[in-house]
Amino acid sequence: MKPAERFRNFQKYSPIEPFEVLSKRLGRKIEDIVKLDANENPYGPAQAVKQSLANLNNINIYPDPESRALRAKLSEFTGVDQNLLLAGAGADELIDLILRVMLEPGDVVINCPPTFGMYPFDTRLNNGVVFEVTRNNDFSINTKKIREAITENSAKILFLTSPNNPDGSLILDEDLRQILELPVLVVLDEAYIEFTADTLTDWRKKSHIQWVSSFENLVVLRTFSKWAGLAGLRVGYGAFPSWLLPSMWAAKQPYNVNVAANQAAIESLKSLDFLTNNVRKIRQDQRKLFRMLSTIPFIEPVPSEANFILCRVNNFSASYLKNFLLEKGIMVRYYETPLLENYIRISVGKPDDHMRLMKALEELQ
Ligand SMILES: Cc1ncc(COP(=O)(O)O)c(C=O)c1O
């Protein structure tokens, strides 16, 4: 017996290193590590979430396979009919599930790098073929090339991300509208959309999740990992066209969203004042960090709408800079891909984290 041949050289996704591992490796206490590498929320969940997790008394019972209570709250939050919503163990699970349901072996999926690494990973995992349409120099999508690629490859799925990870750029409504005219399922990943506005009302205006009821070929994914500070619990959701939902329900693992994740997500939706306030702080600190980074001669920060800033590194190699910062206990995201060879991405942390980062960068001047 041996695993399928295609896994012999399978390109893995490179996830982050956990605190504990890094703490041992660097010989530093966990509290002494500044973690700016995974776009996590430095303020964590709301107090009510922690309280309700401490009081959970049904963890011996499997969770609701349909996450009904959560979907009802999500419907109020997003304005989307709950019958079009499905929750998952993070947006990550839903990306995989869409591909499992949609792809026949050899089907083409369009990816627009540089972008989130799970789209090509899950495509390959599900026997699909990735066709790359590289972004323009300013990280905007190349709509003309996307259109050609879809037609020439009879592509099944196109992944778009707004704001895009790693640069934080938004997709223009006009571009999205044009793309939606094409015969392809568009999966729009809005993992960071809450960082594009200050208030609940504006979050609704900025998100395209309500477009799902008007466009038959649109899926919109969102998550609690970023704005709600629940990355460790793995809970996300998506809005799907009605023709796709029966297959998604059929293929999904029955208990994909665990009891704690369901509960924490519901409590988060009841703690919106606290969470929107944190988002506002993160947005303000993002702007301040951008201004501070701009004063460093070898750093060129890229304007971003999200809780991270991609930085072009001049004079040094990006890997040297990443390792230099790591030695000082500061973790940033570094990429081993040709498109991002000279870049690092810095997540927005707390003001003290930024001070430590700036002090370290100033030492290199
Ligand atoms: C663009 C994008 N989509 C999805 C995810 C994953 O979301 P989740 O934690 O809900 O799986 C991330 C996480 O970094 C991301 O950057």
Image: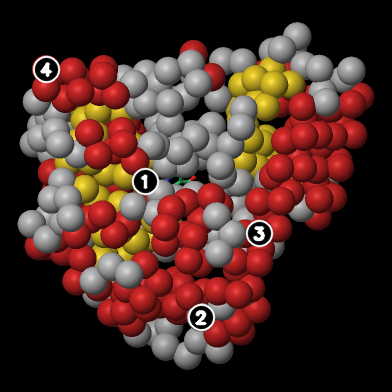
Q: Identify which amino acid the numbered label 4 is placed on.
A: Glu
Residue nearer the viewer, 120 or 26: 120
Q: CA distance from mark 3 to mark 2?
A: 18 Å
Q: Secondary structure at mark 2?
A: loop
Query: Is 354 on the left-hand or right-hand side of 89?
Result: right
Q: Between disc 3 and disc 1, whose residue precedes? A: 1
Q: Is mark 1 within 8 Å of ligand 1?
A: yes
Q: Between disc 3 and disc 2, whose residue precedes? A: 2
Using a 10 Å C-alpha cutoff, classify the residue at mark 3 as few (fewer than 14 neighbours), some (14 to 19) or many (20 or more): some
Q: Between disc 2 and disc 4, whose residue precedes? A: 4
Task: Locate residue 255, reporting x and y percent.
Answer: 28, 70
Q: In percent of the image, x 14 and y 33: which residue is there? A: 182
Residue nearer the viewer, 211 or 251: 211
Using a 10 Å C-alpha cutoff, classify the residue at mark 2 as few (fewer than 14 neighbours), some (14 to 19) or many (20 or more): some
Task: Locate residue 134, reporting x and y percent.
Answer: 37, 18
Task: Locate residue 253, reporting x and y percent.
Answer: 23, 63
Figure colour scheme: secondary structure
**Residue at image mark 2:** 270
The part of the image, by quadrant, that contains residue 185 is top left
Residue nearer the viewer, 198 or 344: 198
**Residue at image mark 1:** 189
**Residue at image mark 4:** 152
Q: CA distance from mark 3 to mark 4?
A: 43 Å
Query: Is 358 on the left-hand or right-hand side of 276?
Result: right
Q: Identify which amino acid the numbered label 1 is placed on.
A: Asp
Q: Identify which amino acid the numbered label 2 is placed on.
A: Lys
Q: Which mark is residue 280?
A: 3
